[in-house]
Amino acid sequence: MDDNGTSSYTVGFLTTGESTVEQQHAQAFLESLATVEAVAFDAVESKNVIDEYDLLWWHRDTPVSEETISADALSALTSYVEEGGGLYLGLYALDAVDSLGIDPHPPDQIESTYVPNHTFGQQPAGFLIKARYEESTVFDGFSALRVNTQHSRKQSTPRLAYHNRVPQNGDVLASCVVGGEDRPAENSIIAWSPGRGRVLGVGQHLVFSELSEPYEDTVRTLVTGLVSHLGDSEEEAFSGRPKTSDELTEMRVELEADTHQPTYHFTPPANWMNDPNGIVEYDGIYHLFYQYNPAGPYHGSIHWGHATSDDLVHWEDRPVALAPDLDGPDKDGCWSGCTVLDDGQPTVVYTGGSGGDQTPCLARATDDSLDEWEKHPGNPVIEDIPEELGILSNDEWNAEFRDHDVWQEDGTWYHLIGTGLEDGGGAAILYTSDTLTEWELVGPLLVGDRHEDGPLWECPELLDFGESQVLQVSNYDKVVYFVGTFDGTSFDRRADGTLDHGNYYAAQSIPHGEGQYLSWGWIREDRDGAAQWDAGWSGVMSLPRILSLDEADTLRVRPTPEIEALRGHHQSLPKQTLSSGDSVCPETSGSALEIQVTFELGDAEAFELVVGESPDGAERTPIRYSCEDELVVDRSASSESTAPSSDPQCIPSISADDGLVTLHVFVDGSVVELFANERESLSSRIYPTREDSTGVSLNAIGGDIAIHTVDIWELDSAFSPDDGKLASQQASPTNSGMD
């Protein structure tokens, strides 16, 4: 910038025909920041015409038709960008990314309705900046992630955004904020890096004819950042997509400073993660797929993320495995599913979302790394929903019909799909087939009671323990299981239970030795959406768990022993008795711990194991076992922030073993995952605000407690670049998916 606030960049302002009032205002605004010349598309016969400009600015408030720009001009513009030029696409110009060869996915949300100027209902609008990009040149000068640029959302027209769709090749830099409401699904500022060039698209809330104080200064700051990024040929471009393993690793490293980010539980590299999908062990490698949104840390635009491990502890990020097709049966999301081996070939069955339909789709791996997948050309493999069963629907979906568990027995494929029935509760629907592409309806395997078992079942899976089987489902609240026998067409239920009493959901399991399964679940966030956006990530995978069935028809659950490989510094406390009011504070503390405590309650009212404790006790999370056999995670003082939930979570009843209770607790950033007597589990989330909220203590309440054993380990990171697991040592091939 010179003394007058004008940059040294020269800008070619692209026009077609007579400029609109909005374009005249936009050009005048730019002229206060840079040297600007109008360039008529009709005059752009070759790239030579526009080579003299540092960047091109195409701002258009009317739709772009096929006749708007000649083929020569489009070709020249594409070459200009690929050979190192900068291009701005504003409002309707953003819709031209497909024509320009920048991205085959144009924005899917286009609103053009102008509301006349009046004060009623007006709300300022602007951008919700992604935390990863707040220090980029584009947003230089802003001190917050929420920036208003227009005095009225209603008058900021037109409005273009990526909503259900995400750009295939671009990075989402910012979404939308209206008044005090975050709208993360309205992806509004996009960056592309075609060839050696840089492209920035702003689809809404940057309208120059309606500027007023204080928004004019805000817009000036933003436009200055846009011009600087596009005009500086030495400026580092955004990486774009698809992303390699190394690029995903870089995203993960950017979040390392977040104390709430776990270090040994699997999390997404950034953005959003929910259900585990398609878990499979193939050629000695464990493949964890998961629901992933590359656009940001919110639920939407679902893809299949992918990570691999050879030891169940250290995980390597792999490129996205499945992405929605532009016009396919999965265009609105590749939802949950499973992996099977069909004559040795890894094959996934997943739910495709399209409009209001949820239908089963199929894809087959085309390489041994399971990075590349080819979707079945006949998708969906089940097209007609069984209307005769009275399947539930809602405002979003024509039928609640999703999530898949597929297995083969005696040459027959079996297929469970989760749903709910209008005249019943949650249900698992059974299909059979000789192939994976043509299915015959058998009927409901099991229908639950709406009030007792939940109105809708997701993520069903049938676990075979020999003489008994277990049907495990997620009922919109928690993971529940039913013990019984499966005869090939129906399930005879005789017992039930709850697998986890906390934030654990959408469990998926694979066989793991005789009479055992290896299982994962999504540990949901428990803080508001704004806090998740500000953090830049959302969602944690549980530790892999070992499931077995005991003689009392109870699922036994414990962490896989492989996690012991992360154990570092160890402290063991001697056997002792704590009297009422006594407190023991071990020297070992931290936010990445494994704690094992075995105690006998005696005549005490309760025993407390406190984690996440500050020295003054202002922040603390007691795990309290009472004489009523109830175990409570008390989160009333877990955080001084109001963003997290402070509600208690509990296991209603834990039976002591010969009077002894063993708690096995894993603390990892914001995760508290605990196991009691290898029979019950509870996964919780806490978000201490203080760096010194890392203490541990043991307390006796209302009587004497016999402490038999206490062992505490500090756990190393499973994602340290130094261990060779986080960063791939070889360049990973890109694929047709996205980060």
Image: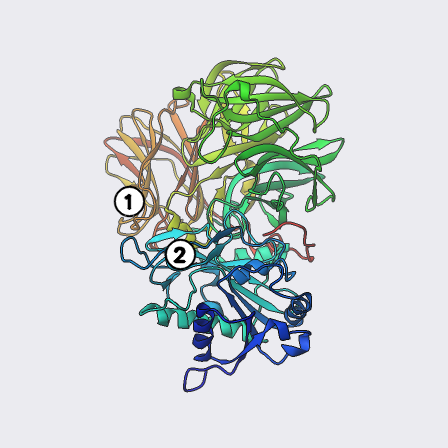
- Residue ID at (57%, 66%): 199
Judge whether 489 appears above or below 66 on screen: above
At 40% from the left edge and 60% from the top edge, which residue is drawn?
156
Q: Label 2: few (<14), some or many (≥20) within 10 Å?
A: few
Q: CA distance from mark 2 to mark 1?
A: 48 Å
Instruction: Name which residue type carries label 2.
Output: Tyr
Q: Is residue 627 left or right of residue 376?
A: left
Badge 2 or badge 1: first in the primary sequence = 2
* 651 on left or right of 308: left
* SS category of the residue bearing label 1: loop
- Residue position marked by numbered label 1 in the rendering: 637
Residue 270 point in image, percent of width and height:
51, 52
Q: Secondary structure at mark 2?
A: loop
Dots 2, 1 in contact, CB < 8 A: no
Residue beneath label 2, please?
114
Residue 716, image x, y percentages: 51, 50
Which residue sits furthest bottom?
Answer: 3
Whether residue 572 is visible: yes
659 or 327: which is nearer to us? 327
- The kind of residue tagged 1 is Ala
Within 10 Å of the Cα at label 1, are there few (<14), some (14-19), or many (20+) other Cα atoms? some
Q: Is residue 265 above or below residue 27?
A: above
Residue 141 figure quarter = bottom left
Q: How many marks?
A: 2
The spot of residue 263 in percent (x, y) is 49, 50
